[in-house]
Structures are given as structure tokens and as C-alpha cells.
């Protein structure tokens, strides 16, 4: 006998992956250059040169047992100290290596936090639109995911709906800013209001309500947009980071969980994070890439390419009559679909070989996601197809 729940998760791909796989099949028929695949968030910008240089330097100058051997379960001491120093320099904080737990990417960071926190009856709140995997991550630890409907005017937090859903069973709030799929960046005003409300509710219910800040897109912002570092605004914040996006290393699966010393009962909470990593089998993130990210700790890929793509695509769609909140970061657009049923809209888009992802799985029907981490030439070739699609409706 097997778990029916696990079977269902394993036998059905996500909507994003379904579109991605369809694109590969379609490309074999019409040619790769004639399929405009905007389905998956796989960075197309090369990793910065320092990544290659770091790998070569490590391989040439360190012994094999150091490169490929076990680190401490929570990560290499020097690596964690280097990351803490970088955070302190950038955000005016006072972290040490003992605030950091190295992980196998942001997904591991988030699931470790869920596992460390969850007690029977717990609920986690997130804000639409949200990354669909949150649901299976939360349910996988026996908790319940509660979704706050989107504020589609600007994709800031819908506080009225949030207050209707927060209750004594709320263990934590999941925040993703810059946001996948909308590209929205929560303003300082939004974060201050969120922190104030959570402080009040924590006192009212007699237990801390945490923030789990999912921030792999923290460095990918445009036009001078500032991303509030949430752990500075609210003490009970876990910062879950991945180098997948900013360093273009998604396949290397390397990131961390930050547990600030100001968090309530911080030492026990950090120990619970270590215990969750142990139970989930996430001890000792990949040793080589721990060392690599330490050497590239303040570097990013060429983010300007994403900004160029955003301008090209956003301005082009707006001129055609599409409606969209301009993103402040990430490499996603989240326009309104041109008919109420976004799934039907995305199916019609396939007639023009446009592969888009409906917003339903992100908790935001009537919208669709475009992942523009592609070559600018693909966007240029795709714009006439978007225009033909628009003429079907407008």
C-alpha cells in the first residue's frame, strides 16, 4: 500500500510543468523558435563570472575532502559567518553564523520552517497570488493553508480580508516579496502595517505569530525599488533565501534559513529548525556550493536584462489593450486574462503557440502569469502573437 495523497501529487504535474512539457512536444513539431514558452521561472541570464572563478579556485586550491566532505549539519561555519557579515553590512543587522541554517534552496528553507513550527490544529496564512507549492508544503506537515484574496489593484496585502482570517490557530504568515507571480514588492507601509497587526494579534492570542519570508527574488528589482528586509521590521521573522534567482543557480539548490536572535525563544526555535532539517533529510546542504556562494555573497547576475525584458513586454501588452499591474521586480508579469476563465484563455493562447500559466493555481482567477526570463528575441517574436490573441477578444 502507498499513500494516496503522495500518489496524486507525484502522478500529476503542476500547471506550470504541464505547460513546460507541452512546449517541448510542440517544439518538436513546429520548431523551438516558433514556440513562445513563458511558462517556467528558469533564469536565462548566465551566472556571474565570479561563480565560475570560485568553482575553479576551490577545486584547484582546496583538498577534496574539504570540498566534497560533510560540513556541520547546519552548514559550514565560515560560509555562515560570511553570509551573516554580508547581511549585517547590507541591512544594518547584527547576525552571526548561529542565526543561519544552510539549506537545499528556498523550498527546503520554507518546509523546514513549517516542520519546525507546526502543532496539531495550526494554520498558515498566505496572500494571493501565491506560489502554488505552499499548499502541498503546508499540508505535508499536517497543517492548513488559509488564503487571503488578492488586492488586484496593486497586489499589496488585502488587510480587511486578512483580519477576517487570522485567528488563534494562526501559527505564521507566509510573505513572498518580490512576489511570484505578480512581481509586486510590498512597500514599507505595507510591512509596517503587517508587523503592527501581528504584534497586536500575538498579544491577543497569547502566542507569537511568525512571518515566514520567502525571498529568493530579493535582489531582482527595477527602477530603484527598495525591498524592505522584513526581519528588521518584525522580530519573529524567518528569512528563507535561495541563490537560485539572483545568482542564476536554480539547479544547484542552495539557500538558507535565518533565525534572528530577537525572535521569541530564539535558541529553542533555531534548535527546532535544526531538528526539522534532520527529520526531512536536509542536513548538510551541498558542500561545494556552500563555498561558492560564500565567495560570491554580494554578487548578482545581470539583472538589467530582466528589466529590459519587463519594459519590452509590459509596454507592448499595455499598448495592445491588456491590463496589468507593473511589476517592481522578479521576472514575471501577471496580466488580467481577456476572458473571465483564465484557463480557457491560456488554452486559446496555445493556438498562437503562446504558453502561459493561468492564475487559478496562484489563488487569483482571471489573471495569467508570463515568465519573461527568456531571451529578448523571444519576446520580440512573441509580441505579434500576443496581438493576434488580443484581437480575438478586443
Image: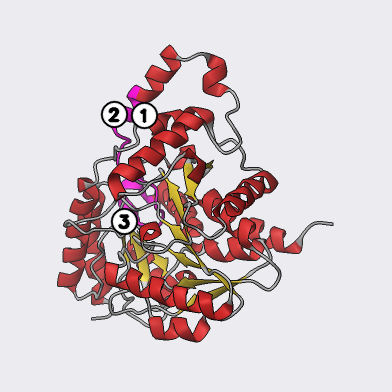
Snapshot colouring: secondary structure
SS for callout 3: loop
Foreground pick, 337 / 285: 285
Q: Magenta segment range?
A: 30-53
The reply to whether residue 137 is in sight is: yes
The reply to whether residue 343 is in sight is: no
User: Which comes before the other along the chain, label 2 or label 3?
Assistant: 2
Foreground pick, 369 / 71: 71
Looking at the rendering, in which quadrant would you find the C terminus? Answer: bottom left
Give the percent coordinates (x, y) of residue 104. Answer: 53, 42
Give the percent coordinates (x, y) of residue 335. Answer: 30, 71
SS for callout 1: helix
Classify 151 as above or below 43: below
Q: CA distance from mark 2 to mark 1?
A: 12 Å
Q: CA distance from mark 3 to mark 1?
A: 24 Å
What residue did someone put label 2 on? 49
Crowding at dot 2, Cα within 10 Å, few <14 / some 14-19 / many 20+, comes out as few
What residue did someone put label 3 on? 330
Crowding at dot 3, Cα within 10 Å, few <14 / some 14-19 / many 20+, comes out as many
Foreground pick, 155 / 205: 205
What residue did someone put label 1 on? 295
* Left or right: residue 93 compared with residue 73: left
* Left or right: residue 77 compared with residue 185: right
Classify 79 as above or below 309: above
Give the percent coordinates (x, y) of residue 2. Answer: 80, 57
Q: CA distance from mark 2 to mark 3?
A: 21 Å
User: Which comes before the other along the chain, label 2 or label 1?
Assistant: 2
Question: In the image, is residue 153 part of the stretch drawn in magenta?
Answer: no
Amino acid at each position: 500500500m502507498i499513500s494516496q495523497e503522495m500518489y496524486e501529487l507525484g502522478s500529476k504535474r503542476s500547471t506550470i510543468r504541464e505547460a513546460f512539457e507541452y512546449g517541448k512536444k510542440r517544439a518538436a513539431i513546429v520548431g523551438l523558435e516558433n514556440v513562445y514558452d513563458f511558462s517556467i521561472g528558469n533564469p536565462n541570464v548566465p551566472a556571474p563570472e565570479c561563480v565560475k572563478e570560485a568553482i575553479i579556485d576551490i577545486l584547484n586550491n582546496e583538498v577534496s575532502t574539504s570540498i566534497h566532505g560533510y560540513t556541520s549539519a547546519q552548514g559550514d561555519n565560515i560560509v555562515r559567518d560570511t553570509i551573516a557579515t554580508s547581511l549585517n553590512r547590507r541591512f544594518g543587522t547584527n547576525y552571526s553564523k548561529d542565526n543561519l541554517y544552510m539549506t537545499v534552496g528556498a523550498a527546503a528553507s520554507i518546509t523546514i520552517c513549517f516542520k519546525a513550527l507546526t502543532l496539531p490544529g495550526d494554520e498558515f496564512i498566505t496572500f494571493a497570488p501565491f506560489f502554488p507549492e505552499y499548499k502541498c508544503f503546508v499540508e505535508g506537515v499536517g497543517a492548513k493553508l488559509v488564503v487571503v484574496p488578492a488586492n488586484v489593484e496593486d497586489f499589496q496585502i488585502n488587510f480587511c480580508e486578512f483580519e477576517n482570517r487570522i485567528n488563534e490557530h494562526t501559527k505564521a504568515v507566509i510573505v513572498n516579496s518580490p512576489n511570484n507571480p505578480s512581481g509586486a514588492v510590498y512597500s514599507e507601509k505595507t510591512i509596517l502595517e503587517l508587523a503592527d497587526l501581528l504584534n497586536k494579534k500575538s498579544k491577543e492570542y497569547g502566542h507569537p505569530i511568525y512571518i515566514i519570508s520567502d525571498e529568493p527574488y530579493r535582489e531582482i528589482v527595477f527602477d530603484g525599488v527598495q525591498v524592505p528586509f522584513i526581519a528588521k521590521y518584525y522580530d519573529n521573522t524567518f528569512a528563507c533565501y535561495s541563490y537560485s534567482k539572483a545568482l542564476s543557480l536554480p539547479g544547484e539548490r542552495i539557500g538558507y534559513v535565518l533565525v534572528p536572535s530577537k525572535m521569541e525563544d530564539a535558541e529553542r526555535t533555531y534548535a527546532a529548525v535544526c531538528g526539522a532539517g534532520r527529520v526531512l533529510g536536509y542536513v548538510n546542504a551541498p558542500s561545494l556550493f556552500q563555498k561558492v556562494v560564500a565567495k560570491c555573497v554580494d554578487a548578482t547576475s545581470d539583472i538589467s536584462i530582466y528589466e529590459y525584458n519587463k519594459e519590452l513586454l509590459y509596454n507592448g501588452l499595455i499598448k495592445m489593450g491588456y491590463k496589468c499591474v507593473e511589476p517592481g521586480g522578479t521576472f514575471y508579469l501577471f496580466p488580467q486574462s481577456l476572458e473571465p476563465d483564465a484557463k480557457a484563455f491560456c488554452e486559446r493562447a496555445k493556438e498562437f503557440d503562446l504558453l502561459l500559466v493561468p492564475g487559478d493555481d496562484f489563488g487569483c482567477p482571471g489573471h495569467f502569469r508570463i515568465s519573461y526570463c527568456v531571451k529578448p528575441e523571444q519576446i520580440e517574436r512573441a509580441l505579434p502573437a500576443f496581438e493576434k490573441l488580443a484581437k480575438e477578444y478586443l
